[in-house]
Amino acid sequence: MKSLVVFIVVVFLALIGYFLFAFTVDETQKAVVLQFGEIVRIVESPGLHFKTPLLENVVYLEDRLLSYDIRSAPVITVDKQRLTVDSYTLWRIQDPRRFMETMRGLRNNAEQRLDDIIYSLLRDSLAQKSFEDILKREFLTEVKQRAQTQVKDFGIEIIDVRIKRADLPTANEQAVYQRMIKERRQIAQRYRAEGEQQALGIRSEADRQVQITLAEAHKRSEELKGEGDASALQIYAEAYNRDPNFFLFWRTLESYKTSLAQNSTLVLSTESDYLKLLELMNSKGLIEALDNR
Amino acid sequence: MQGPIESGREFEERWQDWSRRVGRLGSGAGWLIVVLIVAIWFLSGIYTVAPSEVALVKRFGKFTQAEGPGFHYRLPWPIESVVVVDSQSVRTEEIGFQSKAGVPSTQFPTKEEEALTLTGDFNIISVETVVQYDVTNSEIFAFQVEDYRRVIREAAQAVIREKVATRGVDEALTDKREEIASEIQRELQGLLNNYGTGMRIINVRLQEVTPPTQEVAAAFDDVNSAVQDKERLIFEAQGYSNEQLPRADGQAQQILNVAEGYKQSRILRSEGDVARFLSILDRYRLGKTVTEARLYIETMEEILPNLNKIILSKESGGVLNLLDLERLLGSSTGGEK
């Protein structure tokens, strides 16, 4: 019975002793040991540590990468563009002593300060930039450096400052949409016009080739016909030149057959060679006439 | 004052009675309870690690060792504690949209304030991104970063906007998507390395890159149909060309054939004519006067029967003036007199 009581008492005393004299620092933390509000020492290494009971108390500080969303800043750029810039910063507590002294170890205080500093740095910086510069984000390195010099005294390290978003106000957004639509229409029109242009080109090229092909054919055809005519003329000439008088005689007769059509009326005289025999029969008698010949 | 004393005495008796009884049980049962509590305290140090996980053991807050998958033991509170990190699984962040179970990926609701992004040529597009990453250094991941999801989401948003802003709207919407995604991946990995997060970007995918509103999307679609219109117009023109050119060739061939035919026929005809003339000429040379007369008379025989004829004799020479030519010619239309 006694030994049981003793055991329990020992355990209790051990626990109380542990909580009074010892404290642990986690991997994610640093600790500041205070005595009546004065910083006695800083504990940076994780593990088990000891303190004077009741007199000293321990404040833990985050030793991790912390992310903070800077309130979004309305900005007017050099080229008069309105923007809402939403940024964030990554920071950590670098010097627990300074952090404790200046921020009383409170993360809220630090974040408030970071917000104010980076907000105004960004606004100042962006007001001197054009919209294109802002899209390029190169000025952020400078903002980060200037912010760092301002918060160094607070025991804060700024790891990065970045713009998450640079948005247009809603009214301007609508204007951009309208402009995008207009641009697209123009592009669409250009494509259609190009289509028509090229189609016309192809069609007229086809027409041109058709014309040329037909004209060439015509030319060649006239040449061929000419060759035919020439050959024919030569053949005729060679033949007819053998006896031009007979040709004239013969060809005239031939042409009578076609040129004197039916129902033409011909007034003939009996004095013509062909009909003079008719006259003979009329007056003197056929036989006399024949004798006279 | 009798009552209280009596009751005090009574109480004392009862107390002694009770404690005697407890005492008798006590030394046995009390120890049993204590041993049980101590045993449970020691057993509370048993823990398991899943196959994709790693356990980081801390003694009084200080990291001592990492344990792989399986059953493990650590010293119980307050001496040792364990942080379990899923170091193998691929983690996913969705930026610009919110996936939902049972909804096809193209219909995930868009988170406009994350998705709308300015392009380099001052257009706005909606970009939905999937970032896949895992843990490469569990120690840094667990001990150095307060809120890893927030860090990666904010960095990803910043980098996505930065990279999209280097491109024009057409590039971002079409052929440069892969390129932009791989640039984002590289840049994001660089940032995470700088920050010291123990994370690795496995993949960045631009899931949906679309015009911002339906109206704008319709305008973009119209450009696509304009491209098709253009192709159609050209295609039709080529069709016209393909139809016209062979036809013209055919016509040309036809013209040439006709001409060739004409040429040949002219030559052949002339040769025929000449052949006839020459043969007649041959005869003619045998007897010129007779042939001339014969030809003349034959021709007259051939043509005169079909003609209206008025024959005037030598004596009737002056009568011609008196003849009623009107009547003669008029009646002659009826036929031969």
Image (spheres, helix red, strand yellow):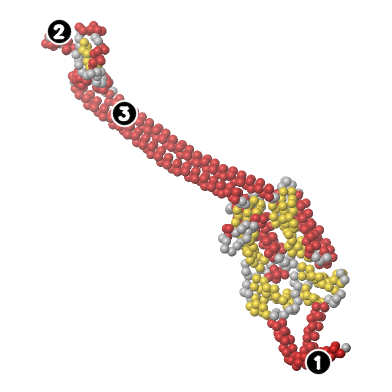
> To which residue does mark 1 refer?
B13
Residue B178: x, y in percent? 60, 57
The residue lying at 78 percent from left, 84 percent from top is A11
- The one nearer the camera, A282 or B161, is B161
Marks 2 and 3 on same chain: yes
Is A198 positioned to the left or the right of B162 in the image? left
The residue lying at 45 percent from left, 43 percent from top is B239
Q: Are marks 2 and 1 in contact (CB under 8 Å)?
A: no
Q: Amino acid at mark 1?
A: Glu
- The one nearer the camera, B202 or A242, is B202
> To which residue does mark 3 refer?
A232
Is A213 positioned to the left or the right of B214 in the image? left
Q: Amino acid at mark 3?
A: Ala
**Image quarter of residue A110:** bottom right
For marks 2 and 1, give the CA distance: 209 Å
The residue lying at 42 percent from left, 42 percent from top is B243
Tag 2 secondary structure: helix
Marks 2 and 1 on same chain: no
For marks 3 and 1, give the CA distance: 167 Å
Q: In terms of sequence position, does the residue under pointer 2 or pointer 3 come before the other?
A: 3
Q: Residues within 10 Å of mark 3 (few under 14, many from 20)?
A: many
> To which residue does mark 2 refer?
A283
The chain ID associated with circle 2 is A
The chain ID associated with circle 3 is A
Q: In front: mark 2 or mark 3?
A: 2
